[in-house]
Every structure is written in structure tokens, then in C-alpha cells.
Image (cartoon, rainbow, N blue to C red):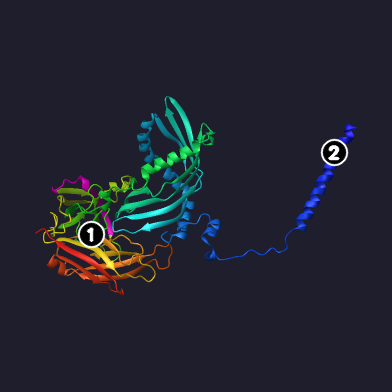
Amino acid sequence: MGFFSTILGFCGFGVGISTGLVIGYYLFIYFQPSDVKDPVIRPLAEQDSQSLQQLLPEIPPWVKNPDYDRIDWLNQFLEVMWPYLDKAICKTAKNIAKPIIAEQISKYKIESVEFEELTLGSLPPTFQGMKVFSTEEKELIMEPSLKWAGNPNVTLGVKAFGLKATVQVVDLQIFAQPRITLKPLVPSFPCFAKIFVSLMEKPHVDFGLKLFGADLMSIPGLYRFVQELIKDQVANMYLWPKTLEVEILDPTKAMKKPVGILHVKVLRAMKLRKKDLLGASDPYVKLKITESKAPSKKTTVKHKNLNPEWNEEFSIVIKDPESQALELIVYDWEQVGKHDKMGMNVVPLKELTPDEPNVMTLDLLKNLDQNDAQDDKFRGQLVVELTYKPFKEGDMLKDDNQLQKAPEGTPLGGGVLVVIVHEAQDLEGKHHTNPYVRIIFKGEEHKTKHLKKNRDPRWEEEFTFMLEEPPLKEKLHVEVLSTSTRIGLLHPKETLGYVDISLADVVNNKRINEKYHLIDSKNGKIQIELQWRTSS
């Protein structure tokens, strides 16, 4: 009897389930409303703020704030470069973190904290937008909106009380709004000396923390405590106005202002090799300072002479005697075609005793490669007299109250031409207005910094030219140019105007500070100050 009851129970259950499904499906179809209307589609501009928040819970800053620029190109750049940036950033992070860790661990009686593994993973951060500030100082200020949900692997080995523990940080999320300041801007790559980083608000930091493989964040109450502790510690160190300072270049070396003058007297050459078909050569010497954009200087040509004497003097401005060198190359002059190189040599300026004449006899080499067997061949010798005269303290310092004299060692009868580019007004480009000034004088060229989207730029930059005689018949070419900030070949550069300034007036008046109308510009003007400084 019990067996039959069981069989009947199973059959009743099956029949009941089947009957219920059929009745449910019938009721669903029968009672389905027939007056369903199509959803109303409206433009986003007609939606209220609450509806927009529901549709777009995370609106990028460049959408709701006109001060932010969209920088999708930067995100694409990061995606491609991330494997290489990962290694470079981790190396820099270790160097920055080591002194900070060493300073902090003593407070908590920890013996050491070392990185056993440090990688940022395969997912790069995303920049939601960036705000750029323009100031009157030589600096660039940026405020990016940063979001990073990455898969890094940060493993730390912590030693305390004779025991070692391994702590691993995984699944890191960081939402931050840093302020990045590049200053001072200098004319040496990468064109800024220091990076200053501050946080404009407390960052959102979320991560997993493993100790001996166990997830510590699963412990009740620990997750929120650790998260808030890290937020407070980071804010205490880097929340604006506090900053993290990273030095890229030595600012004193990066600015590279003139620090002295090198007087070169090319005396003679001896036993030069024959280059011409008739058994002679037409030698001359070319002088150039390394790490300088100044044009090279040349002696006269001594025709058909293998033991020429020149006794010619030159003065060259020096900016960094520790790294710069004088390059001397002897050429054989040719009336047609390329001039043949007869030999060369280099004199590092740090080997010269300041303020003392140094007469040097230099063996001419094919090149500076010490492994080159052809350098063993005798190519002749060059005799020169070198005198390096460093400026005395205050020689080139700017003084608004009086016109200072040229530094000691300035060529007799010559002087220093100082060009100060103050500002420009009413600049207007056809396709873009990102102005900078190019100054050309006697083949030497200088450029100011580039300013983005500015019709009334202000530079306040100073340039100097060492001259052997007053420029009474010379002109200074000043040109304002604009370069496109977008990558492409269409209109990459355009001229906003130029002016050629006669220098006779500045020689007679010692100082001129005027605004000049730019040629090929509708209303553009540029303010240039010129000074002629002599030693007398």
C-alpha cells in the first residue's frame, strides 16, 4: 500500500506542475495590456537634470565644465605606450618612495620595507579631461581628471621584530584630481626643470590587501579604516598647497646664461698634409663651441701653404665651462665642391685655467674615435692660444635703475647687445594663434617659449649677443610665429608678422624700449627692449 501511495504522489505532483504552468501562461497572455505605447524619445537637451543623472551617471568633466578640454588623444597614447611607461614609472616610484618609507618606518618600529614586486598591470589610467592655466610666470599648470581601475601587482616585504611578512596590493582603483606644475620653463630638453604635484581634493582610493595570501579587507571594519587612513595620509602630504617636488634638471644649468668669454687666438699650423693635385693645400680653421647654437667662426684662407700663420683672434660666449668644449677643424678650401677636412681636435674648457693664457699645440686627428686606426697617421699640428675669462659676480645681473656695463673680457671696441622680448598685442593667425618669437642676428637664432591660444602674449625673455664691433649698419630680424597644437600636416606653422630693427639707434642711445608694428599683420604690435653695453 505504501508503494502505491508513493507512485500516486509523484503523479499528482507532475500533473499539478503541468497544470499550473499552462494556467499561468494563459493568464499572462490573456491579461497582457494591449494599449502599450512606444517610448517617447527626446533630445538630451530637453531632459531635466535628474533624468540626465540617471541616463549618464558619470558625465566627463569636459561635458559639464567648459574649462576642461577633451583629451582622447592622450588616452590613446597611454594605451599604446603603457607597457613602456609601466617600467619607467615603477622605477621612478621606487626612487621617490624609498626616502619616504625610510622616514616613516622609524615611527612604527619597522625594520625595513622593500618592494619584492612592482608592476602597474596592463590597464592604463584614463583622463576624463584636463584644465590648463595661463600665468605670467615661466610655468605650465595642468589639472587633469584621472580615473584608474587597474590590475597592478605591488608586493612589499615588511620586516619587524625579527619577522618578515609579505603584503600584496591588488585591484587598485584611484580617482584623483591632481594639479601638475612644470616650472621653471627652460630652453633645454625636456624644457622644464621641476615637476610639482598637488592634490586639489582628497582622492578616492580602493584596493585589495593580502597578507600571506589571505584577503585582509574581508575582516569587518578593517576595509573602511584602512581606506580612510590612506586618504588622510596622502592628503596630509600632498593636498594643496603641499606639493611633491621631482627635479628633472638642475635649474641653474638648464637656464644656461652666459658665464664667461673664451678668447681664442689661432696662431699657426705646421706640417699639414697635401690635398691639392699640385702638391699644396689652402687651409683655414673653423671654430665652434659644443652644446651651443651660435654660428661657427672661421679664419681666413691661406692659399698654397702647408705651414700657414694666422694670428687671428676670436671671442666666444661660454654658458657651461664644465660641459662645453672648443672644437677646432682644419679644412682645405676648394673653389668648387665640398671642402676637404684635413684634421680636427677638441679642447674641453674645464681643462683651462681661468684668466691665464694657455698656448697649446694640438695634433690633428681624423675624428675623435680612439679605436680608429687611421688616427695614428700624422696629419699635422695646430697651435692656438686660449684664455677663458669667467664673468665676475654681478657682471650680467639685471638692474632696472641703471644700464650696466658689459662684462670683463668683452672685445675691445665691441660690446654686448641685449634683446628683451616683453610682449605682443592684437596678434591674429588665420588658423591658430599659439605665438612665439624668433630672433635672428648674424646667423645666430634664438626663440622664446610657445604660448597657447593667446592674442596678447607676454614673454619677458632676454637674449644676449657678444659682438666684436658696434652694429651700426646691422639689423635685427624679429618674427612672430604660431605653430599648431594638433598633430597633422595641414597649416602646422604660420607667420603672424615680423619687423627688421635697425641697431644704429641703440648704439647711439644705449637703450631703446619701443613697440613696433608687425609687417604682414593687421593690428599686431610687439614690444622690444634693446640695450648696447660696453666695457667703458
**Can the viewer see residue 295?**
no
Residue 302 drawn at (x, y percent): 19, 61
* Disc number for residue 9: 2
Mark in front: 2 vs 1: 2
Q: Earlier in the sequence, mark 2 or mark 1?
A: 2
Residue 196 drawn at (x, y percent): 34, 48
Nearer to the camera, 531 or 526: 526
Residue range in magenta is 340-357
Classify residue 264 as left or right of residue 162: left
> Quadrant of residue 451 in the image?
bottom left
Establish if 536 lies above or below 526: above
Residue 238 drawn at (x, y percent): 37, 45
Work out which quarter of the rendered image holds the N terminus and state it.
top right
In the displayed orientation, state which residue is furthest to the top.
162
Nearer to the camera, 439 or 154: 154
Residue 99 drawn at (x, y percent): 35, 37
Indicate whether residue 355 is drawn in magenta. yes
Instruction: Please name the residue that numbered disc 1 is placed on.
Output: 462
In the displayed orientation, state which residue is furthest to the left.
536
